[in-house]
Amino acid sequence: MSEFGIEESFDVYELGSYDFSDNIDFGECAGVYIFTKRDIYSELNATYGKEMYSHTLIYCGETKEMDKRFYSHFHAQDIIDAGADRISIYKCKNKEEASSLEKKLLATLKFPVNKKGNDSPKFQNIKKVLEAF
């Protein structure tokens, strides 16, 4: 996401049939997470001669406890309804770093399920980002 001024590199995980009825354990640390829906990026497949993917942005959040955050998430149904099939994780040193990165992401990109702090991001019309998180 460096083209948008986001230099942090996120790890992308497939959600499979995850339904928020239990936790996803990413360890006991603070972090930022982004729910997305992965799509084949057809236009780039011909250019690069291999399958390329993009991610439709759905929701961005932060937590001080990555190992406990996802069970019964308060936006679970909205995230499921939006078709999320991936979660991208960036582990932070502490809650302050996580909060700062989340604010930067919400000020930069539009996440349709986020209700607070995402009213007028810098790149409001960007709906997808390339997989190279």
Image (cartoon, helix red, strand yellow):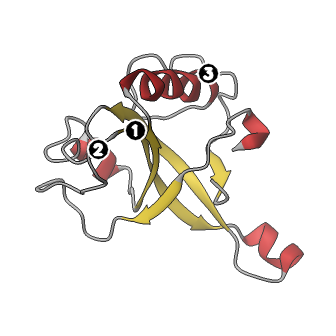
Residue 68, horizontal then vertical, whole percent: 18, 44
Secondary structure found at label 2: loop
Mark 2 or mark 3, which is nearer to you? Answer: 2
Q: Residue furthest front?
A: 93
Q: Is residue 132 left or right of residue 107?
A: right
Pointers 2 and 3 in contact (C-beta within 8 Å): no
Residue 73, horizontal then vertical, whole percent: 20, 40
Q: Residue at x 29, y 44 (%)?
A: 66
Q: Nearer the viewer, residue 69 or 42?
A: 69
As drawn, the label of residue 121 is: 3
Q: Residue furthest right?
A: 47
Count neighbours of disc 2 (C-alpha within 10 A) and say few if under 14, some if 14 to 19, many if 20 or more.
many
As drawn, the label of residue 31 is: 1
Pointers 2 and 1 in contact (C-beta within 8 Å): yes
Instruction: Tell me the distance, in whole angstroms, between the alpha carbons under discs 2 and 3.
Output: 25 Å
Q: Amino acid at mark 3?
A: Pro
Identify the image quadrant of residue 54.
bottom right
Secondary structure found at label 1: strand
Instruction: Tell me the distance, in whole angstroms, between the alpha carbons under discs 2 and 1.
Output: 6 Å
Q: Amino acid at mark 2?
A: Met
Q: Is residue 101 left or right of residue 59?
A: right
Q: Residue furthest bottom?
A: 49
Count neighbours of disc 1 (C-alpha within 10 A) and say few if under 14, some if 14 to 19, many if 20 or more.
many
What residue is disc 2 on? Answer: 66
Mark 3 or mark 1, which is nearer to you? Answer: 1
Placement of 33 over or under 105, stated as above or below: below
Pick whichever of labels 2 and 3 is earlier in the sequence: 2
Residue 60, horizontal then vertical, whole percent: 43, 36
